[in-house]
Amino acid sequence: MDTRPSEDRVARRTWAGGLTAGIGAGLLWGLAFLLPELLHGWSAVTVTAGRYLVYGLLALTMLALSGPALRGHARRHWRPALQFAITGNVGYYLLLVLAVQAVGAPVTGIIIGCIPVTLAVAGNVLDRVYPWRRLVVPIALVLSGLLLVNVLEMSGASPAANTPVAVKAFGVLSALGAVLLWTWYGIANARFLDRNPDVPHGGWSTIVGLGTGLVALAALPVAAVAGQLGDGAGNRGDLGELLLTSVILGVAVSWAGTALWNLASARLPSTAAGMLINVETMSGFAYVYAARAEWPPAGQLAGFAAVLAGVALVLRLRATR
């Protein structure tokens, strides 16, 4: 009996489910660009700590309710869990929030949108898959798009025009640092899972979430001594807004977003799943301008389109391997 039509339908459903999950994760992750811009009177350190304390508390609850196998994985692999908690979560998001507050969410979103390309380049350095000449055009598109967006930002064609140049430069450097951290994390985490196939993907997210909460908790005394639990000048915003934002970021963005991402990663080729990270950038870009009730400058749209075109070419190259 020919089972190919049935297998094709299953494959299509699997692909559709993974694609839907990846898009859902990106839509949730995009909130990470909007919420810090809406929250006033609290420093980037406070926003980061609130998000990951909630995420860690949720992970602790889930770990306590899980079986002994997952707790055994947590005991054996706590070192990489802490490394990934610092690089992929706390450090990455702290730099992202610093960038949002310094240079604005649109520019931050565009720079963060380079992560799929940096992953592709780093992967090609570590495991040569394509001749570099096949990556020249997409990389050039991405870089030209970033240049266009940032030139317009610095020259006054966007809402952050009155921000001092030094602050803008700090924001751009923070965003670039976030890209570097997440690129390392993405490669290192994938290698860990490949070397440890007995560790379930969802369970690993819980273990890393627990490590993330511990890192955030340990950093609180330092933040308090440094006076960073307000807006950096000792001021305080609305506590209710902070708590609500922390719950949304910790539960929806971190926990639910990661759960959807794990599903996408399980059902899609790793390259296709990686390219869906751009949904995060697109949704963050859309959320912020919708909240401002305005359209972005045409030049920024053109730069954003160039970035998306470059990423699409990378996806096509890898998909035709």
Image: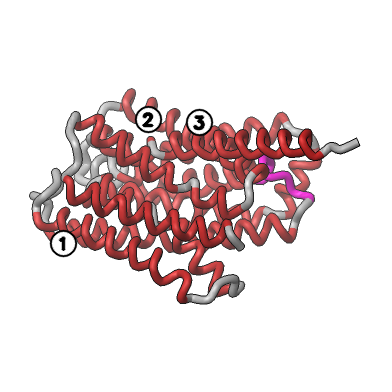
Residue at (57% x, 41% y) in the render = 261
Read off the magenta span. Answer: 198-204
Residue at (65% x, 61% y) in the render = 191
Q: Which residue corresponds to mark 2?
A: 245
Nearer to the camera, 64 or 198 = 198
Nearer to the camera, 216 or 304 = 304
- Check the image and report above or below for 20 versus 89: above
Q: Which mark is residue 146?
A: none
User: Could you tell me how far apart the alpha carbons at marks 1 and 2 are, in whole angstroms?
Assistant: 29 Å
Which of the image's four quarters has the C terminus? Answer: bottom right
**245 left or right, relative to 2:** left
Name the amino acid type tagged 3.
Val
CA neighbours of label 1 inside 10 A, class few (<14), some (14 to 19), many (20+): few
**306 left or right, relative to 54:** left
CA neighbours of label 2 inside 10 A, class few (<14), some (14 to 19), many (20+): many
Magenta segment: does it hold 75?
no
Q: Which residue corresponds to mark 3?
A: 251
